[in-house]
């Protein structure tokens, strides 16, 4: 594509506007692997207890900040022994990891429900960023508390999961001849993931938000796609 050429094309669909209240708060997202019916009653109880601790921790992080919240505070709010918290989450950053896992699982389910497998890779990338942005907007105070903590304490950029998911979408586009095959999909996934996180971190850094997140991510994706598209 010539430099400066517009990215609009027949394959790109107009952004769909979400109905109000359609996006859940991140704290209420279910685990990445919902408990199947055949699990024993004991195992279901364990998963329910873990889920309750997770929701309690996320609420406290949002109210008081990650650093100010102790494992003792989580235990007290959940009305369990301190040792019980450590049985499910061995350290405080494990709650941040679970937060990221649940959000990615929610977006993956939303994309699967949208039957995007046959859509162009560019459309899949846009949908991924739109779904993630919608989660952030729906729970901005929570995003501000946990995304910042994930950046400073949780090794956010060392987590390979977002890179791998985006890399797979890039690989799909390369196989179909939509994206340039000489580009390393792993590196492309890393660039996309880093650009996403840096945009969200700037979005939560000021109050009120300095820009509309969904639109800003869409513009960011436009810039990166100039180097990916055939």
Image (spheres, rainbow, N blue to C red):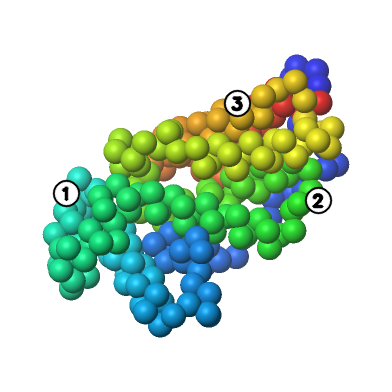
Residue carrying label 3: 187
The residue depicted at 52 percent of the width and 52 percent of the height is 104
Q: Split into 4 quadrants, where in the image is the C terminus?
A: top right
Residue 204 location in percent, x, y? 38, 41
Q: Earlier in the sequence, mark 2 or mark 3?
A: 2
Check contact, mark 1 vs mark 3: CB within 8 A.
no
Residue 175 location in percent, x, y? 81, 35
Question: CA–CA distance between discs 2 and 3?
Answer: 24 Å
Q: Which of marks 1 and 3 is nearer the N terminus?
A: 1
Residue 24 location in percent, x, y? 48, 64
Counting other residues with Cα less than 10 Å from the Cα at mark 1, is it few (<14), some (14-19), or many (20 or more)?
Answer: few
Residue carrying label 1: 68
Counting other residues with Cα less than 10 Å from the Cα at mark 2, is it few (<14), some (14-19), or many (20 or more)?
Answer: few
| Front one among 179 and 9 | 179
Residue carrying label 2: 118
| Front one among 184 and 213 | 184
């Amino acid at each position: 594509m010539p430099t400066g050429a517009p990215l609009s094309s027949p394959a790109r669909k107009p952004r769909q506007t979400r109905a109000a209240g359609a996006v859940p708060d991140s704290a209420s997202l279910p685990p990445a692997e919902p408990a199947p019916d055949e699990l024993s009653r004991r195992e279901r109880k364990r998963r329910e207890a873990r889920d309750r601790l997770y929701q309690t921790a996320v609420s406290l992080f949002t109210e008081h900040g990650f650093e100010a919240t102790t494992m003792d505070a989580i235990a007290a709010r959940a009305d369990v022994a301190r040792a019980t918290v450590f049985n499910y989450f061995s350290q405080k950053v494990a709650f941040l990891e679970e937060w990221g896992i649940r959000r990615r699982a929610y977006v993956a389910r939303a994309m699967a429900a949208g039957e995007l497998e046959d859509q162009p890779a560019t459309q899949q990338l846009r949908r991924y960023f739109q779904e993630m942005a919608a989660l952030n907007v729906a729970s901005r105070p929570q995003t501000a508390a946990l995304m910042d903590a994930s950046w400073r304490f949780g090794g956010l950029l060392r987590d390979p999961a977002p890179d791998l998911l985006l890399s797979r979408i890039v690989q799909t586009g390369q196989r179909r001849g939509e994206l340039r095959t000489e580009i390393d999909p792993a590196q492309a996934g890393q660039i996309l993931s880093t650009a996403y996180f840096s945009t969200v971190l700037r979005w939560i850094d000021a109050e009120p938000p300095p820009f509309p997140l969904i639109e800003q991510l869409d513009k960011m994706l436009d810039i990166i796609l100039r180097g990916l598209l055939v």
